[in-house]
Image: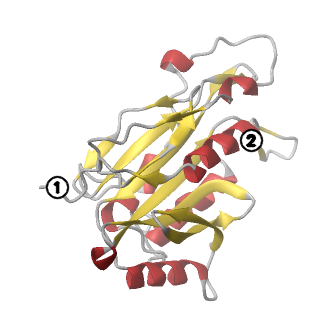
Amino acid sequence: MTGATVAAAAFAGCAGSETTDGGNPADSGSSGGPTDSESTTVPNAIQETDKTSGGGNDSTPGSNPDPDCSRLAGDPVPYDGSDTTFVFSFDYIDSWELTEPIVGARGRTQGITSPVVTVDGERESASIQVIQSADPLSASEVDSEIAAGTEGQYARFEVVSEQEFDGETIQVVGISDSDPSFYQMWLPHGPADRRQYYSLTINTLTSILRLNEDNQSVTLCDDPVHTAAETVRESLRPNPDTTIGEA
């Protein structure tokens, strides 16, 4: 787990369990795991990708100690969000693979796994977790969540970007504007007079790294991993076929 991902997991403790309470940056004392068999917290959702299997993303170790980062590149393809509780859809890089979603009463997590590459003969990969809470917030509650996570003496996060979604300008909370390993935002859904907001987290984990002479982790293939994460975030758009709110 990289230092950036550790910080993202720390924000999960600060923000609460993404699929259990919609994010709560004020809760800096919690870090926990899932509260029940149906809910998935961010720390669990970003566990390291299995290095022993990669399905169609498999790779055979070669003589080159450096990873072939070109395997992680590709073109954006649309995610099919129909018949899901996601209030949004997005694009992802076509060399990456969707994993089986984790669905519970309090949210949905969709994993996206990179091709496997080799680093010094070891099989490594990266993954992105796209996590939406099922618990909506009001506009004022969203403002409180953002303020609690980004303001004050102990704030560890900041508003790193703004983007348009369904006619509104939404704020994107992250670690810093140069670190795309963690994003949280609240997406609007519903008619103007009954608008609600759903917490969305985009969390990136990479094990494509090696230790330097000071025994510090140095991540590799940063550009294609960052591109994959930004592709998801920048392509967010309303999902007209969402099942959110259906009995």
Q: Earlier along the polypeptide chain: callout 1 or callout 2?
A: 2
Residue at image coords 80%, 11%: 63
| For the residues bearing labels 1 and 2, Cβ distance under 8 angstroms | no
> Looking at the image, is 217 positioned above or below residue 117?
below
Check the image and name the residue furthest to the left. 247
Q: Amino acid at mark 1?
A: Glu
The x and y percentages for residue 195 are 33, 73
* Left or right of residue 119, residue 195 in this image: left
Decide which of 191, 198 is in the foreground and name it.
191
Q: Is residue 46 visible?
A: no
Give me the residue at 57% from left, 60% from top: 183
Q: Position of residue 38 (x, y in %)?
A: 24, 50
Q: CA distance from mark 1 to mark 2?
A: 40 Å
Query: Mark 1, mark 2: which one is toward the viewer?
Result: 1
Please give the residue where the numbered disc 2 appears in the rendered image. 222
Query: Would residue 221 be found to the left or right of residue 59 on screen?
Result: right
Residue corresponding to mark 1: 246
Seen from the viewer's position, the closer of residues 157 and 92 is 92
